[in-house]
Image (tube, grey):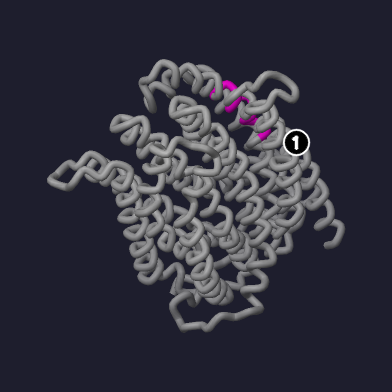
Amino acid sequence: MIRYAPSMEQPITQENISSTARARQEARKFLALAAPMFFTQLALQLIQVNSVIQSGNYSTDVQAGIMLAGNLWFPVMVGIGGVLFFITPMIAQLFGANKNEEIGPLVRQGVWLAMPIVFVGMLILSQAHLILTLAKVDPEIIKHSKEYLSYFIFALPAILLSQPLRSLCEGTTRPLPVTFLNILMLIIAIIGNYTFIYGNFGFPEMGARGAGLSAVIGTWTSFILLIFYLKIRQEFEPTKLFSKFDLPNFRILKEILKGGIPVGLGNFIELSMFSGAGIILGRFGSEVIAANGIALTIGGLFFMVPMSIANAAAVRVGNNVGANNMIGAKYSSYFSLRLAILCALIASLIIILNAESMARILNNNPEVISLAVILLSFAAFFQVADGLAMGAIGALRGYKDTFGPMKIMAISYWGVGLPVGVVLSITDIIVEPMGAVGMWTGICCGLIVAATLMVRRVRKITNQFINDQ
């Protein structure tokens, strides 16, 4: 039988922490994790991009409806569902400590926890269209959002129930299966949207509902295949995932909730700033909604890079903490910040040079493109801040430090970003209402504050763990 073993690498000491050899070793390990994780997240984002492109070619109102639906379901999924994301660093620490037999029971408890979360998420999404009504969005656009969500709601169980299984793959440094399954979901989404939105291949024309239906088919296919994969692969046998049936264990559930609730709240706080911006701007009509959605969609594609770095950092730091290698954990933490800055600078340059051509791919309306290009200039500006914040969050999760980052997000995004954006976009308290430009100015302010405070938090926590050791 193939057994797990902690990765064999040179222990890090204060003497070799800055060596070139160590940097190359860390880069290789980060790349082995971050590259598959990037393509995993990229495939997920491209599913939404594909929906935007295909719905935009079908109808601007349908496109706006699907975009606003995304502003509703994504914060719900990564908010209440974000509680389950904490299972990844928990598994990473167990894997680093070579406690493989404890991983399977943890994953099973994660599945138990996912069940009530699925119920709450579906309940929220069933009434989410009321938020758009309160935001004074055009009723025709609300209709398309409601149609999309009426089908997508049935994809939520597959998405959330698969999260503990995905954490198993990523926490044990085997992220590739998840990558391949997400690529499969993308292929299904492309074919499904073409089939159901437009009514091709003999199927009825469904518009926004068709995009939701293709999401249901893709997510459930991926979930079933992931279970099958974990069942047949010998590499996962030491975790005892399928060895027995467990009833809920309140001690383990409490540990997941203690670290996971701040993760979920933090995710919701951050996403609610972007989603809230989209909903607030909904009052300005479908062109502004489309331009804002295009900027968010393209920005979201580039966001997959710092998110992948953050996920890799959580695993690398968690493995080192589990192995009681606190100097190594600190090195991995700071490496994630340096890597995030480098990737962010490259992303900023790409956005600046290609903003208009990227916007044209998603929409051919000149007014929409013109505003989208302006908003993309803001996205290029905040890449470094966003990258630093995400790299720091990932490193801190590896230490199981989640409450502090959540507080920072609340201060930065709800205390600075969203309020400044609202004041500048729809009021004349400071200047005449600036619309989408004002909202994105506020977002930039929030991200800069978050990056500054997160980096300080990393310095504090890494030194604290070394001193405690």
* For residue 338, above or below residue 33: above
Please state the extent of the stretch shown in magenta in the rendering. Answer: 376-385
Which quarter of the rendering shows the C terminus? Answer: bottom right
Give 113 or 141, whichever is nearer the viewer. Answer: 141
> Where is residue 409 drawn, in percent x and y?
71, 45
Q: Which residue is mark 1?
A: 449
Q: Is residue 63 left or right of residue 407?
A: left
Task: Identify the residue at horizontal 48%, vertical 20% (top origin).
Answer: 355
- Residue 140 sits in which quadrant? top left
Tell me if residue 342 can be seen.
yes
> Where is residue 404 drawn, in percent x and y?
76, 53
- Residue 99 sits in which quadrant? bottom right
- Residue 6 sits in which quadrant? bottom right
* For residue 217, above or below residue 372: below
Q: Is residue 52 left or right of residue 20?
A: left
Tell me if residue 31 can be seen.
no
Q: Is residue 420 left or right of residue 228?
A: right
- Decide whether residue 383 is among the magenta residues: yes
Give 433 or 148, whichever is nearer the viewer. Answer: 433
> Where is residue 94 drawn, in percent x and y?
62, 68
* For residue 249, above or below residue 6: below
* For residue 278, above or below residue 186: above
Task: Identify the residue at horizontal 49%, vertical 51% (top origin).
Answer: 128
Task: Identify the residue at horizontal 36%, vertical 70% (top origin).
Answer: 232
Q: Secondary structure at mark 1?
A: helix
Predominant SS of the magenta segment: helix
Q: How many C-alpha atoms fall within 10 Å of the one at disc 1: few (<14), some, or many (≥20)? A: some
- Decide whether residue 124 is among the magenta residues: no
